[in-house]
Amino acid sequence: MTMSINGGTEVKKVFIGAGCNRVVNNVSWGACDLVAFGAQNAVVIFSPKTAQIVTTLPGHKSSVNCTQWLPSNKFAFKAKELEKHYLLSGDADGAIILWEFSLLERKWRYALQAPQSHKKGVTCITGIMVTKTEALVASTSSDGKVHVWEVLFPSTTGGDCQLQCLETLFVGSKPMVALSLAELPGNTGHMVLAMGGLDNKIHLYCGERTGKFLRACELKGHTDWIRSLDFSLPICTNGEPNSILLVSSSQDKGIRIWKMALRSSLCSTQGAYRKEEMSLASYIEGPLLVAGSSSYQISLESLLIGHEDWVYSVEWQPPSTESVEGIGYYQPQSILSASMDKTMMIWQPEKNSGIWMNVVTVGELSHCALGFYGGHWSPSGDSILAHGYGGSFHLWKNVGVDLDNWQPQKVPSGHFAGVTDIVWARSGEYVLSVSHDQTTRIYASWQNEASLIDGDSWHEIARPQVHGHDINCVTIVQGKGNHRFVSGADEKVARVFEATLSFLKTLNHATSQNISLPEDLQADVQVLGANMSALGLSQKPIYVQATHDNHDRNGNDGLDTIETIPDAVPAVLTEPPIEDQLAWHTLWPESHKLYGHGNELFSLCCDHEGKLVASSCKAQSATAAEIWLWQVDSWKAVGQLQSHSLTVTQMEFSHDDSMLLAVSRDRQFSVFTIKRTGTDEISYQLLARQEAHKRIIWSCSWNPYGHEFATGSRDKTVKIWAVDKGSSVKLLMTLPQFDSSVTALSWVGLGHQKNDGFLAVGMESGLIELWSLSVRRADDGSGSAAGVAAAVAVKLDPFMCHVSAVNRLAWKGPKKSENCKNVQLASCGADNCVRVFEVNVDYAEN
């Protein structure tokens, strides 16, 4: 009985984890209640309702700096009937892309790229909907120019968008970094564009829908760079819109509110106007803004002081949709500010005096956050979102009925730099990833969340390692015993970490089954959590009994006060954690350091029995390119394998642990035989070394059911090899050339007949393909491979794939006896993303 894959391979997205680029203006919350942000060169979309990333949009060649929804949250009251919403994104090369999102189909489409790009990185995009099919947009860049664009949306389905540059404003050598657009009140048909930047002034330009923006006036008062500007919607008196408010924030830690009031006409006398308008609230009169036949008196309404560091963003609360005095919205007198002092504040005028006060303060008060880069309202105004220095999001929702009660909510999280390696837990309960953002993170599906309709939701459940070096590689120690992993960073030492009691209990909550407490260790896990020393890199254990010692920590107990930092409180989590808990209370203690390599570590792997770990480092000589073998538990070096002359890029043990495969920058692969001669001793021998490709070999993977393996290279090829009768290696086949360098490979077996499997191929372009491989055995009974049949099973949709190089692929393999219908594939890439896919396989029995 043979089985064939019936062409019915289906791949679906299970999870995406990603962190936010550390730039201001990077995040936008749209009227459709989705949040957009940039993660490296991907535009990422997440749903605050489910705390899950929905998709990533491929298109940018460089890091995404800013996003802007059309309509934004400010125009949610106008967007009820819209079937399509649009998103603009700008990158570090100056390119601006327009995306179309269909609300009914929940599908994304790349609409167009702006024809005239900026010469340097785009720093801010702002836009307003003028009608349902037309928007006015402004963009600014460090090239010293501000472009004003007209965007026309198709009035019929299937039509194309149009984007046209109406005007380019030259702002000189001190570029603008903040913009805001508004329609002036009073039905004048005129627009006002506010811009601010490095010269500490706010520049106001007046224009029409067709462009013709002219400098009108400037507002002085801030004493440092302007970081954020936002116009309110027109404020109405007696049913007529007659004024508009502008809020500005600066690195001088202050926030200013400016009022632009329509004067009855140009001929009205200054005296009469002053008597009528002047009040305690508008106490400093500024310049006059002239737009066509109307003029607007500008005055400083209020100066808000309360933040202790740079104020990176200010935003008016979006209008609610109640009709007030005949107009379709009511602009709340409420402003959200976000600062590098790690807090967000909501400001509102006091009822009696009209003086603006800080009414709500939320924030990360721990030592581990480094401030907020921006804050945003939800379209309904009941939630506020901040993004921070660590690429993290922080969301609060007002759950109070009569009184305000802002409570932290779950958000997506992930790495904020390229993700270098990924590995599944031994039984597949979680995925562990490491990154150049110097953290190790654990993601798992949280199965007991009743609120979710469509199955499990994945979350980051622990951050076991927070380190001072970029982390390049990781492996989980297989075999019995507690969960342990070994990681290697840009230092010469590999570090071993051991799971804590609090993590094991948290994992039980997440998986809703008691599988994670190893029988042999349940009584022995005495380590509850871990602490990071202030001036060191090692994470010290916190023991179970230590939590009962209530000695006075404030007394002089010999601790150097500089080194004392707040103690972590290891917590058992009963629901997915928020950023503050992750960053501080989920560390694992470091149990060993492995010294031996002469350079920064580059790759690691563990055998299937959990007896040996192999490590390699960056190398430009044969001595440095040695592979070290370490014995698990004693952590002694038990071998130094010599074969290559440049960095060994990946290693893997064969399924029966009898061989170790290594591939290298020197374009060669090596196969070593590994024999265990005694309890503590092993012998190893180089079985074969061969120049296999024309360029660097990035990746390799064994057939889980035989001694065949695949190698993938920068030369865009994948080759399948077989160890022939245990003595030499022969080439079985070369897959057709791929469109891009092959950077990651992983082979999984699919059951019953042991020569069927999938090879996942990841490329530098970010794309992933699955190939079905069927190995034909020789008839002589030796079990050696006679040939291999290969076919493309599925090419993953680019919207599911990575947006830049795939760094590692890893299957959560089925048990060897199973004939599996679905398997999970994890991937990580240079786009800061960790992804998990489910692959469903249709078998037809012949």
Image (cartoon, rainbow, N blue to C red):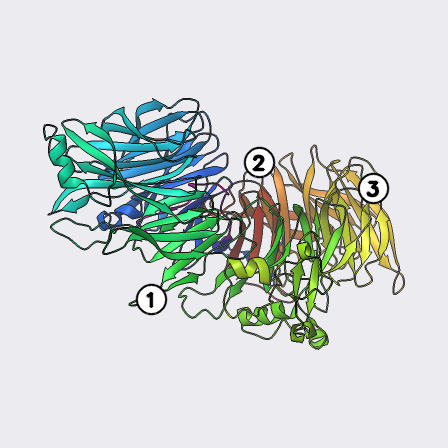
Q: Amino acid at mark 3?
A: Ser
SS at mark 3? loop
Residue 327, image x, y percentages? 14, 48
Q: Are marks 2 and 1 in contact (CB under 8 Å)?
A: no
Q: Gap in Å between the C-alphas at discs 3 and 2?
A: 28 Å
Quadrant the N terminus occupies: bottom right
Q: Nearer the viewer, mark 2 or mark 1?
A: 1
Q: Amino acid at mark 1?
A: Gly
Q: Amino acid at mark 2?
A: Ser
Asked if residue 27 is among those painted magenta in the image, a careful observer would answer yes
Tell me which segment is drawn in magenta: 17-34
Q: Please tell me in which quadrant of the rendered image residue 409 appears.
A: bottom left
Does residue 786 appear in this view? no
Q: Which mark is residue 643?
A: 3
**Where is mark 1, residue-wise?**
400
**Where is mark 2, residue-wise?**
740
Name the residue nearer the viewer: 475 or 206.
Answer: 206
Residue 408, image x, y percentages? 43, 61
Number of residues whose C-alpha sits closer than 10 Å to that of mark 2, classed few (under 14), some (14–19) or many (20 or more): some
SS at mark 1? loop
